[in-house]
Amino acid sequence: MVSAFALTDVLVVGGGPSGLALASELARRGLGVRVVAPHAPQPFAPTYGAWLDELPAWAQACTAQVWTDVRAYTGSQPTPLLRPYALLDNTRLLDTLLERAGERLCWTQGKVTGAQQRGNLWQVHGEAGEEWTARLVVDASGHGGLLLPTPFEGGPALQTAYGVVAHFQRPPSPPGAMVWMDYRTPHLDPADVRAEPTFLYSMHLGGDRYFVQETSLIARPAPSREFMKARLYARLDALGTPPHDTESDEWVAFPMNAPAPIPGPVLAYGAAAGLVHPISGFQVAGALADAPRVAEAIAAALENGQDAAAAGWDALWPPERRAARGVHLLDLGALLELPGDRLGQFFAAFFRLPAAEWHAFLAPHTGVREMARSMLKVFAHAPNAVRLPLVRAALAHPGVSLSALKAAARMKAASASSHPALAAARHPEGMTKSDDASSVTGQREANSGDIDQQEVIEEGMQGAVGNVNAAGLAPGVDREEKLEELRENMAEVTGQK
Ligand SMILES: Cc1cc2nc3c(=O)[nH]c(=O)nc-3n(C[C@H](O)[C@H](O)[C@H](O)COP(=O)(O)OP(=O)(O)OC[C@H]3O[C@@H](n4cnc5c(N)ncnc54)[C@H](O)[C@@H]3O)c2cc1C
């Protein structure tokens, strides 16, 4: 057991699933770890869901329930997603993480207010005047970050949801099934759907118990709790399935548009490190899965007297992941611009991608080229009513979209040397003049308008047809015809003939 006053190797700010996952993997590698959180160890409060295949093997034993009948409704008929989905058992997850960590993890109740680096050590300050010393500090304090605040461009764009666990006389969703997304809203005025699109996320928990949650995928400004609650009850009333005996309710609100963080001397992890997926809002499975790799990098660096924060950042946000975040933010920007009543059609096109591709698009570590191609295939599948706003949105966000599309078009293979700006940004305090110059050059390159949109579209379309992934386009679709259609759409929105 680490004594309350001893120097610890790593101090982790936050006792959520991410901080604890990393702390546990560090402790398993023989490091002394202090977790500081305002509360004693307690089961995580939110209802956490995850694709079963994204959970590490040990965490698959920490599930409360797993559904194989997983569906999406983007129109009147269900789309079977054919991918098992899990509800996590938060008590078992907490106990397992603590058990896996063993005696080298020390939990300290307190609220961190700041941290200072003195030589090779960190002094971390608590609200009640405490001081803790550690060789490395990890900010795992949740969305927005404490020691490394997240700069949300244009302000945070939130996912919000209101849900209840309740008993129902009639099933509000198919018994035995998990409904990942149900965009059907015949009970609402189309103008209201257009302005504030929401969908139902629902789990049958057994017997007459269901978890039903009305969800706004992403919005800025976000709908209020009262609004979302009213939407949920309006849906249940329209279905003729009002709940009785409500056991609990839950309000969800967190930002989806975190950029890839600029590495600094404090490492961040989990939501504080921008790890929330910008399209799905998922984070937990990725944090559990990434923890061993990041812990390994930190342990090796501490052992060899190297910069442990830099090693952790490299393991967590390699160049390929940073580039992929650009594509995800492009897509997020497009979804924010899309009229709400088109979201169902967007996801209909999305789920027409081959399963491996939509799985990859929602996964934490998919490469930028693969993702950009999938996105362009969604453009190709979608009706014009969806496609045009998406293209317009892409062009309306040059800072994000051009760098993302440029990366998609040009990036041949990820390597650290191809990202001079990132390498320079990692240690701003130690930046030399030449570092500085390479940073400026890298930035200018990323933001230049020097990109051929047409080339990007063709590049993406090649991924959609003419190879083993050809299932990305419906059988019989003429590639040239589709390409010509896309060219016309581009001409329409850019004004170029
Ligand atoms: C209601 C809800 C439902 C969600 N559902 C899902 C889901 O189904 N699947 C999914 O993958 N993601 C989901 N998310 C998104 C995201 O994965 C979660 O928010 C997740 O909890 C983030 O984990 P974390 O450990 O990074 O941060 P958090 O869980 O927020 O934990 C942060 C920790 O830091 C502590 N802390 C904060 N400030 C300080 C301080 N000053 N000093 C010390 N400690 C501090 C907190 O007390 C807490 O222990 C959901 C989010 C919410 C809000």
Image (cartoon, helix red, strand yellow):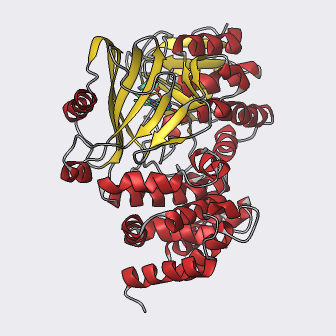
Which residue is painted at 42% across and 42% down in the image? 149
**Which corner quadrant of the image does residue 126 belong to?**
top left
Measuring from the top left, give residue 70's x and y in whole percent.
54, 33
**Which corner quadrant of the image does residue 372 belong to?**
bottom right
- Regarding residue 451, the answer to whether it shows in the image is no
Which residue is painted at 59% across and 22% down in the image? 66
Measuring from the top left, give residue 110's x and y in whole percent.
44, 15
* Closer to the camera in the image, 489 or 147: 489
**Which corner quadrant of the image does residue 85 belong to?**
top right
Q: Is residue 30 above or below residue 347?
A: above
Q: Is residue 136 above or below residue 442?
A: above
Image quarter where the N terminus lies is top right
- Regarding residue 250, the answer to whether it shows in the image is yes
Q: Is residue 205 above or below residue 366?
A: above
Image quarter where the C terminus lies is bottom left
Is residue 246 shown left or right of residue 377?
left
Which residue is painted at 51% across and 30% down in the image? 140
Q: Is residue 482 above or below residue 70?
A: below
Is residue 199 shown left or right of residue 376?
left
